[in-house]
């Protein structure tokens, strides 16, 4: 089986290449890869590369993720996160491939007080959120076999993410101001990749080697809830215990209003994992457990670029 991973160098894509290796031949591409590449700004590139590879599974782990910059680069965000997914879905349908795509909590308004279910009305509050919703809708309108996996607060030992930013700033500064009134469940990129592998393996087993599935949207995030300040506090404690940090920084809890940004962030980003557990019998661990596991690798240098 050929598994095409789009977004070769991203933190989730890097983990996917390792987790999925036992399920088939992995072909990971991005706009810089050789001899085959894929440019999500170029629709012809998407179609040509998928047709050339003819995979049985396509996993899109690429995205425009510059949330604030998207408020200015609207067309670019909409193309990469939105229109490109329609082209990808058409190509997947033509070659009979299952399309797995990662979406985000930003498709919601962030005003809920209990974990978001998959059928909760979407109401993105930023260009980034709107572009990701556009991608979901584009896939659904094409049809075919697809799984849209919404996740949130993704971090890991590679790439650009909150954990690595905090570790860098904690080494540089004695005090940090961290937002304490936005809530979510930090989700380790390896847990996303591992769950994706389990979902794909189950799909193969249930369909006797065939890939058609009950297409739909599923929430894929760690259990529990914390604030960015709470997350940063745990990161610092783990880093101190592992010897990554040699001194403790003061972490000041601040409201969102004290840290203005061009794009509005959801105040509440907790995603319910009930549907995922019911359909695939998969439940991601508590975010604290995942963070402990992540640091057990990161502290040894295993996960570092």
Image (spheres, rainbow, N blue to C red):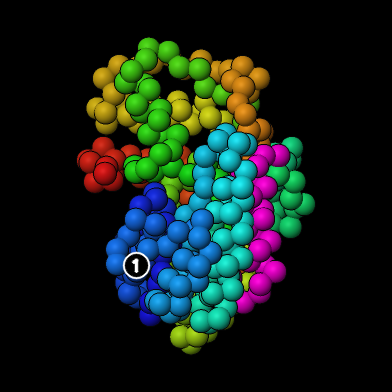
In terms of depth relative to the viewer, which is nearer, 176 or 274? 176
Residue 227 x, y percent position in the rendering: 56, 30
Magenta segment boundaries in residue numbering: 125-147
In terms of depth relative to the viewer, which is nearer, 128 or 226? 128
Residue 172 x, y percent position in the rendering: 33, 18
Residue 89 x, y percent position in the rendering: 58, 70
Q: Is residue 208 above or below residue 103?
A: below
- Looking at the rendering, which quadrant does residue 15 occupy? bottom left
Label total for image: 1
Q: Is residue 128 magenta?
A: yes
In terms of depth relative to the viewer, which is nearer, 79 or 15? 79
> Element under label 1?
loop
Q: Is residue 31 magenta?
A: no
Quadrant where the C terminus lies? top left
In terms of depth relative to the viewer, which is nearer, 14 or 175? 14
- Please, what is the dominant secondary structure of the magenta stretch? helix
Q: Is residue 237 above or below residue 286?
A: above
Quadrant where the N terminus lies? bottom left
Q: Residue at x 43, y 71 (%)?
A: 49
Q: Residue at x 45, y 34 (%)?
A: 162
Left/right of residue 170 with respect to residue 146 in the rendered view: left
Give the residue pinned by disc 1. 36
Q: Residue at x 52, y 25 (%)?
A: 229
């Amino acid at each position: 089986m050929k598994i095409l991973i789009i977004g070769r160098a991203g933190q989730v894509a890097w983990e996917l290449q390792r987790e999925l290796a036992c399920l088939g031949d992995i072909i990971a591409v991005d706009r810089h890869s050789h001899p085959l590449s894929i440019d999500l700004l170029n629709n012809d590139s998407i179609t040509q590369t998928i047709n050339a590879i003819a995979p049985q599974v396509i996993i899109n782990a690429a995205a425009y993720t510059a949330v604030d910059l998207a408020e200015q680069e609207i067309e670019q965000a909409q193309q990469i996160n939105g229109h490109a997914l329609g082209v990808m879905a058409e190509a997947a349908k033509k070659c009979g491939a299952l399309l797995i795509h990662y979406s985000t909590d930003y498709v919601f308004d962030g005003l809920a007080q209990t974990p978001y279910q998959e059928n909760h009305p979407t109401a993105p509050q930023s260009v980034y959120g709107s572009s990701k919703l556009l991608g979901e809708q584009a896939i659904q309108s094409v049809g075919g076999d697809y799984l849209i996996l919404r996740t949130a607060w993704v971090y890991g030992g590679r790439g650009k993410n909150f954990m690595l930013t905090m570790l860098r700033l904690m080494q540089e500064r004695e005090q940090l101001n961290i937002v304490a009134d936005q809530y979510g469940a930090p989700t380790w990129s390896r847990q996303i990749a591992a769950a994706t592998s389990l979902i794909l393996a189950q799909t193969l087993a249930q369909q006797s080697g065939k890939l058609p599935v009950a297409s739909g949207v599923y929430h894929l995030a760690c259990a529990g809830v914390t604030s960015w300040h709470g997350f940063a506090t745990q990161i610092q404690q783990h880093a101190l215990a592992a010897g990554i940090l040699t001194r403790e920084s003061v972490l000041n809890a601040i409201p969102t209003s004290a840290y203005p940004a061009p794009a509005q962030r959801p105040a509440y980003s907790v995603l319910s994992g009930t549907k995922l557990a019911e359909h695939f019998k998969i439940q991601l661990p508590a975010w604290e457990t995942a963070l402990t596991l992540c640091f057990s690798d990161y502290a040894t240098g295993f996960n570092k670029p």
